[in-house]
């Protein structure tokens, strides 16, 4: 496995890799959720590249950029074990050579204004801009993203399609702890009590999913009741939408999404719902 930092070293190493190339972009602090993406890429591609970059452009002024966990040595051990060919861990100046951001950025459109976009203004513009840059820098045949960040996955699919970015976007199912909690790099912030309270999110989603045969309203009321039963969980939103995050369908595939704050930690999760 090769590990590089500069753009020049990245391009040299990239040129030597056989196609098809699979790309797994991450912000590091790797856990079993990231491993699912890396394993899917390893199974389907001749070469696997992972980027390890905490993107300042997608954090708001009062968010956790400074304290976001950074564990590069451990991350490299995970990549090595899975058989990644090339890890690119650039500095901010390698990704944004004209200062820590860009003047031109990707406009996410209406799906970027709802749910996470309403609570984190500018977040998806920052995500889509850095993903567009990595897709252009790496030029992978396939790029892997988690369903855990369902709105992000949806927007990346739309961007790749609308802007003809030339990479297939592959969604990978959410990896969970045995008790249901979706794995997240931010779970390390949770105290033992908060960790228990955080289970309300996945419990609510699965209860909502199980109520689907009684219709959309039953899904929402059942999930809402589960969330309300746990103190210390401040819900930002609980929403049922169609699979593209538009209006709820009468029947068919839908998505139930939740975001909540548990102490100072903000968590998101979602499940598929068959109405
Ligand atoms: P991050 O490092 O948090 O930016 O995540 C990098 C990629 O891993 C994104 O595509 C995430 O959606 C994905 N990911 C994060 N957590 C999980 C999880 N629990 N299951 C599956 N994918 C995940």
Image (cartoon, rainbow, N blue to C red):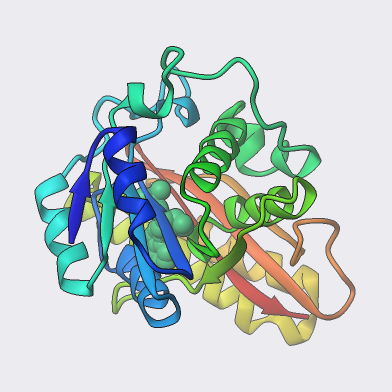
Nearer-the-camera pick, 191 or 86: 86
Answer yes or no: is residue 182 visible: no
Above/below status of 14 relative to 250: above
- Compared with 110, 246 (above or below) is below
Specify whether 233 is left or right of 117: left
Q: Is residue 196 above or below residue 210?
A: above
Q: Residue at x 82, y 56 (%)?
A: 246
Q: Position of residue 7 (x, y in %)?
A: 34, 34
Q: Residue at x 59, y 57 (%)?
A: 153
Nearer the observer, 157 or 235 = 157
Q: Which residue is pictured at 39% across the width and 68% down the height?
A: 18
Quadrant of the rendered image containing residue 79: bottom left
Along the horizontal axis of the image, is 263 left or right of 160? left
If the picture is divided into quarters, which one holds ligand 1? bottom left
Identify the residue shown where x is 60% and y is 15%.
103
Nearer to me, 223 or 247: 247
Given the current orientation, which residue lies at the most extreme bottom position?
Answer: 213
Q: Position of residue 127 (x, y in %)?
A: 54, 38
């Amino acid at each position: 496995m090769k590990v590089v930092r500069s753009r020049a070293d990245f391009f040299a190493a990239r040129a030597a890799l056989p196609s098809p190339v699979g790309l797994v972009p991450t912000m590091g602090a790797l856990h079993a959720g990231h491993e699912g993406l890396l394993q899917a890429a390893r199974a389907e591609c001749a070469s696997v590249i992972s980027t390890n970059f905490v993107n300042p452009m997608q954090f708001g002024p009062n968010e956790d950029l400074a304290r976001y966990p950074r564990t590069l040595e451990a991350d490299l051990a995970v990549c090595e074990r899975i058989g990644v060919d090339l890890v690119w861990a650039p500095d901010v100046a390698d990704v944004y050579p004209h200062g820590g951001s860009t003047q031109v950025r990707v406009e996410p459109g209406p799906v970027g204004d709802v749910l996470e976009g309403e609570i984190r203004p500018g977040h998806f513009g920052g995500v889509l801009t850095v993903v567009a840059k990595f897709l252009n820098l790496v030029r992978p045949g396939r790029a892997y993203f988690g369903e855990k960040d369902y709105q992000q996955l949806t927007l990346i699919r739309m961007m790749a399609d609308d802007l003809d970015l030339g990479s297939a976007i592959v969604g990978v199912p959410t990896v969970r702890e045995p008790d249901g909690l979706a794995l997240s790099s931010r779970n390390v912030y949770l105290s033992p009590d908060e960790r228990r309270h955080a289970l309300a999110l996945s419990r609510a989603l699965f209860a909502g999913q199980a109520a689907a045969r009684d219709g959309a309203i039953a899904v929402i009321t059942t999930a809402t009741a589960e969330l309300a039963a746990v103190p210390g969980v401040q819900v930002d939103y609980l929403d049922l939408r169609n699979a593209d995050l538009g209006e709820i369908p009468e029947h068919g595939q839908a998505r139930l999404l939740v975001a909540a704050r548990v102490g100072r930690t903000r968590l998101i999760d979602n499940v598929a719902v068959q109405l």
